[in-house]
Image (cartoon, rainbow, N blue to C red):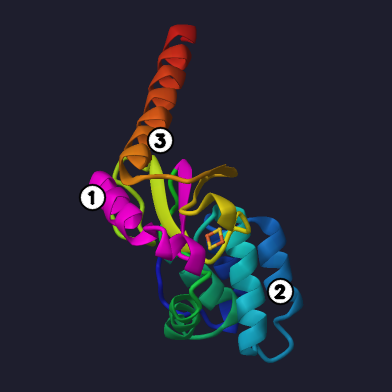
Amino acid sequence: MSHAVANTDNWAEVKAACTEFLPEHIIAYIEQNAKTTHSESQLIAILHLVQGHFGYLGKDQMHAVAQLAQIPFAKVTGVATFYHYFRLQPRGKHIINVCLGTACYVKGADKLSTRLMDELGIQFGETTKDKMFSLESTRCLGTCGLAPVIMVDDQVYGPVSPAEASLILEKYLKKGKSQKAAEAAKV
Ligand code: FES
């Protein structure tokens, strides 16, 4: 895709090019709002739609938003990087959330975090190369009695020692392998 900012003369062309990167409903939403001035809150709403659809904000998607909304690409990336809830990378198959709330912290969430980072070879906010795990942090999962707590997808584990964290990772890796084997056997 050409990343040149489009002008209004070739709107149909721009729209056609953008359909490669954005679904119809998001293009329609941007078009609906095209006659009003694009405030930051509108741009945030658009980026939420994009992230809701793809799980993250890809470069091509942000270029398409900039072209359709007729705003500079730098403004789109500026907003996307300013707000921490926007993700610029695809997430892994499993999302590990480490609770860094007070109760978990005093019970060793820092050691737990270090172990997970070492095992996975990533920092908070990153995804493993095999796209298996994303590591994120959160504040109080509401299960302080189990501190320190981690949540993998929607399953809460606690109290978790660093050694147990490794076992939990292994469990998900094994599950992934057996799923792959089962899929391969079907072919
Ligand atoms: S502080 Fe971790 S669950 Fe409340």
Crowding around mark 2 (Cα neighbors within 10 Å: few <14, some 14 to 19, many 20+) is some
Q: Distance of mark 1 from mark 3, alpha carbons?
A: 14 Å
Ligand 1: give its quadrant.
Answer: bottom right
Quote the CA–CA distance across marks 2 and 3. Answer: 46 Å
Query: Which comes sooner in the sequence, label 1 or label 3?
Result: 1
Mark whose residue sits in front, 2 or 3: 3
Residue 130 position by quadrant: top left
* Mark 2 residue element: helix
29 in relation to 71, above or below: above
Specify the quadrant that holds the N terminus: bottom left
Give the number of the disc on residue 31.
Answer: 2
Residue that appears at 23% across and 50% down: 118
As measured in the structure, the alpha-carbon distance from the residue carrying label 2 to the one carrying label 1 is 46 Å
Q: Position of residue 7 (x, y in %)?
A: 54, 83
Q: Could you tell me the amino acid type at mark 2? A: Glu
Q: Is residue 163 left or right of residue 178?
A: left
* Label 1 sits on residue: 118
Residue 125: x, y in percent? 39, 62
In the rendered image, which residue does mark 3 sit on?
168
Q: Which class describes the residues within 10 Å of circle 1: few (<14), some (14-19), or many (20+)?
A: few
Label 3, residues with CA under 10 Å away: few <14, some 14-19, many ≥20: some
Check if mark 2's residue and mark 1's residue have beta carbons within 8 Å. no
Q: Which residues are magenta?
A: 93-121
x%, y% of residue 112?
Answer: 34, 53
Element assignment for label 1 = helix
Residue type (three-letter) at the residue carrying disc 3: Ile
Between tags 2 and 1, which lies in front? Answer: 1
Going from N to C along the chain, the mark reached first, 2 or 3, is 2
Q: Does any portion of residue 16 appear in the rendered image?
A: no
